[in-house]
Amino acid sequence: MQEREPDPLWLAEPAACWTGADAGGGIVISGNRIVELVPAGATARTPGARRESVAGLVLLPGLINCHHHFYQTLTRAFPPAQEKELFEWLQALYPVWAGLDGEAVTVSTTLALCELLLSGCTTAVDHHYLFSARTGDAIDRQVEAAAELGARVVLTRGSMSLGTSRGGLPPDSVVQDEDAIVADCERLLARYHDPADDALCQVALAPCSPFSVSGELMAAVAALAAERGALLHTHLGETEDENAFCLAHYGKRPVDYLEAAGWLRPGTWLAHGIHFSDAEIARLGAARVAVSHCPSSNLFLGSGLCPALDLEAAGCPVGLGVDGSASNDHSNLMEEVRQALLVQRLRYGSAAVGATDALRWATAGGATLLQRPALGRIAAGAVADLALFDPMEDLRFSGAGDLVTALVTSGARRARHVMVDGRWRVRDYTVEGVDLDALRARHAACARRLQAG
């Protein structure tokens, strides 16, 4: 991994700095922390601060991706999975994903993280839930790949235990024994989970969904998470099919199922969160359960529109997720910010949702969801995770009156520079230390093998 810049570093005079009050003159970084906000026209007070001009660039806190499936980059635009809703889409892809091997996990993780870094994302959640004899070390491989890139990750140990023979949706070939799942969760927490506020790697526990795990596993994992101080994650409220499945198999709606398993508590976050009643939203908010809004995936699969403002008003932290590339076909979080703005305006009206709401979900909202207050903001003491965008790189920004708003409404696609933990990971649109052409060729070969079966 690249060494940190010589201390301290003054990023001077950005064209705009979002969330950094009185930082018109830039910010000073020492180690992995922001130590000073410099007012416009002033000089950094920190002794020995080395000045680097970022004039003309827009400075944002690093974006936080709250839900993803890295391995799905290997099945983008897979023909048999097109024009299908969620359950049929999954049934078309489960047999393909069953062919994952260790190389597929490593290369998909590396490519997805590079794609995210280039979009300004500095913290990425991945939800890996497919394990076999060939991918038992999937999370270990992801830890290694993220460390080589210097990316900040929350790797969630997903699981599926309820195959078709027991009434679940996935085929029996991709489910695991529940005792083995819990044992591996314990192993990964002990080996990789770092509870520090600036940790580069944390582990959360993430049974896949009500239609792929048993209620007993949900409860066992919740108990383990409480014991080890880990977060909990699952898919919930994504489709009406899920509601019908829970009623048919458990005699209760998904939120009731969640409560029965001990998940209705702070430290739980849900992917999607679309199909809740008003009373269920109130219960989720009272319990401080968080939601990762995944607008592109929801549109791609026709799942519905997340009630983000209602969830926030009830007390639910809301973040953004790109979701799996197969249900989105890109891993670009900055593009997801614009999508969130448009989707939520469609739901609530243009006067109710602004560009800074969408940026907030992608930064401070994600940090709150992950219980990481040192992330997602530009302030003295915050971790130096930063994304700098160049509004002059594309004709689409010409004539913009407000540069921060323009990044969202005009549609920024890539960051010029990205810093993670005080280290530059992207410089001039290039991921440090990565041959992207070689990575793309390796990834494409892996995708061809997987899709060919």
Image (tube, rainbow, N blue to C red):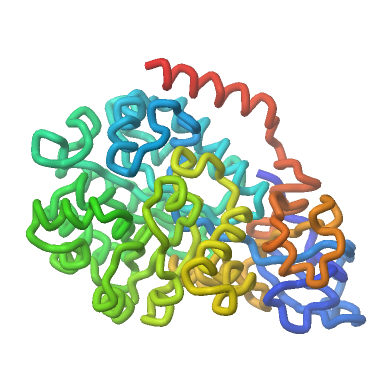
Q: Quadrant of residue 309?
A: bottom left
Give left or right: position of 333 versus 264.
Answer: right
Query: Depth check: 297 or 437 in front?
Result: 297
Residue 197 seen by the camera: no
Q: Is residue 417 above or below residue 13?
A: above
Residue 438 placed where, x, y %? 66, 24
Residue 246 placed where, x, y %? 15, 55
Q: Is residue 268 above or below residue 41?
A: above
Residue drawn at x 64%, y 70% is: 355
Give left or right: position of 110 versus 133.
Answer: right
Query: Depth check: 216 or 357 in front?
Result: 357
Q: Quadrant of residue 154?
A: bottom left
Residue 150 placed where, x, y %? 61, 47
Task: Name the image quarter holding the N terminus.
Answer: top right
Residue drawn at x 82%, y 50% is: 394
Give left or right: position of 373 versus 85.
Answer: right
Residue 79 placed where, x, y %? 44, 26
Residue drawn at x 82%, y 66% is: 400
Residue 72 seen by the camera: yes
Q: Quadrant of residue 17?
A: bottom right
| Count of numbered marks | 0
Task: Name the image quarter holding the C terminus.
Answer: top left
Residue drawn at x 43%, y 63% is: 195
Query: Depth check: 32 or 448 in front?
Result: 448
